[in-house]
Amino acid sequence: AALPARPAGLARGREEARGLRAEVWARALCRDVGVKYSLDGLTGNIFEAHRLLAHAEKAGGAEMQDKLMDVLFLDYFERARHVADPEVLLAAALAVGVPDAQRVLSDPEWMKEETLSQMQLFGRGVRGVPYFIINGGTRLSGAQPTETWEEIIEQELEKAERS
């Protein structure tokens, strides 16, 4: 799918422009796959969602974890549900058949250490998703427009030529 044209008024500031462009781009991508993209839902600490996802992987492998992640993404991005809400998490887990979901959500120690370890390992410096680390150096947070990727690829090729 072609990216939408650059919205008017993007000269307000580089970071604000990138954010706006990324949101327009994300809306277009979601529209192309039939997802109504919305950022109307509440945000907050989603550690409980991570614990439940870790349990889903342990209980049913990557396939179960992926199914749960799909439901949670739709809950947040399309249905504007608060994915830190235990009722939303439980409904999502039950919808995909995650065993012992109620027990996991009612026991704050369940999978806590495993989840913290995973988050520390993969989350250093992460401030948004998706998060990219290119060749161990350049880091990008959030969806990025094509122009940003083109610039990064050019920089990485130049670095490789100098090496």
Image: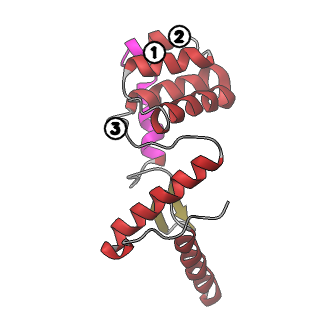
Q: Indicate whether residue 108 is drawn in magenta.
A: yes
Residue nearer the viewer, 161 or 94: 94
> Is disc 3 placed on a helix, strand or loop?
loop
For the point 53% across and 28% down, which residue is it?
A: 54
For the point 44% across and 41% down, which residue is it?
A: 119
Q: Quadrant of the C terminus?
A: bottom right
* Between marks 2 and 3 in the image, the one whose residue lies nearer the viewer: 3
Residue 125 on image: x %, y %: 38, 55
Question: Alpha-carbon neighbours of circle 3 within 10 Å: few (<14), some, or many (≥20)?
Answer: some
> Of the residues shown, which amino acid type is indicated by label 3?
Thr
* Residue tagged 1: 104
**Residue 142 can be seen in this image:** no
Image height of 73 relative to 137, above or below: above
**Which residue is the extreme one toward the front?**
8
Q: How far apart are marks 2 and 3 (CA)?
A: 25 Å
Q: How far apart are marks 1 and 3 (CA)?
A: 21 Å
Q: Horizontally, is 63 left or right of 135 in the view? A: right
Q: How far apart are marks 2 and 1 (CA)?
A: 6 Å
**Residue 162 can be seen in this image:** yes
* Residue tagged 2: 100
Checking the image for residue 152, the label placed there is: none
